Amino acid sequence: TYAAANTLDDYEEGTWTPVLTSAGSASDQTTSHADGSYTKVGRLVTAVIRWRTTSNGTDTGQFGITLPFVVGNNLSTTGLEGAASLANVSGVSVAHSDLSATPIDGQNQIWFYYKSSSTSTLVSQLLCSHTTNIFDGRATITYMT
């Protein structure tokens, strides 16, 4: 029947503990807050993250945060597979005019990027070493599994 084809059969809400990463491995940054919650409807995931470091550690790789599900490859022309809205981010030590985070297909994390005031695109990776000891922020991420 027509109604059966439109039945919502996959709805989930939950929490997870996001892990701060450096180039894909757990970073040596220490945290006082790493909280995450999500809603998954079918393949669509909306995740909310809060993080706060108490030490930026010694890692020099790109800063990332894990997500609750692996990001799907839904766009054939790019690996950037979703969007993140960042709020109340503080503790970035590199001069920048914009900050962004993007989920990448085949991975279960978002990666952070920044735009310096002298460039027009978000091309620079935000490294763990670009953060201060108190690196604090929130993000809402939407992506497909």
Image (tube, rainbow, N blue to C red):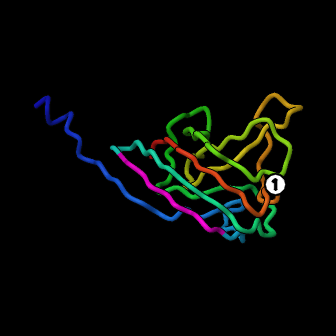
Spot occupied by residue 55 in the image (x, y as percentages of width and height): 74, 68
Depth check, front residue: 113 or 135: 135
Locate residue 127: give its quadrant: bottom right
For residue 23, side relative to residue 5 (left or right): right
Q: Please state which amino acid type lies under the numbered disc 1.
A: His
For residue 134, side relative to residue 68 (left or right): right
Q: Mark 1 points at which residue?
A: 130
Q: Which residue lies furthest to the left in this view?
A: 1
Spot occupied by residue 131 in the image (x, y as percentages of width and height): 78, 56
Residue pictured at 57% horizontal, 47% vertical: 139
Residue 36 within the segment the image draws in magenta: yes
The prevailing secondary structure element of the residues shown in magenta is strand
Q: What stretch is highlighted in magenta?
A: 31-40
For mark 1, give the secondary structure.
helix
For residue 19, side relative to residue 114 (left or right): left
Residue 24 within the segment the image draws in magenta: no
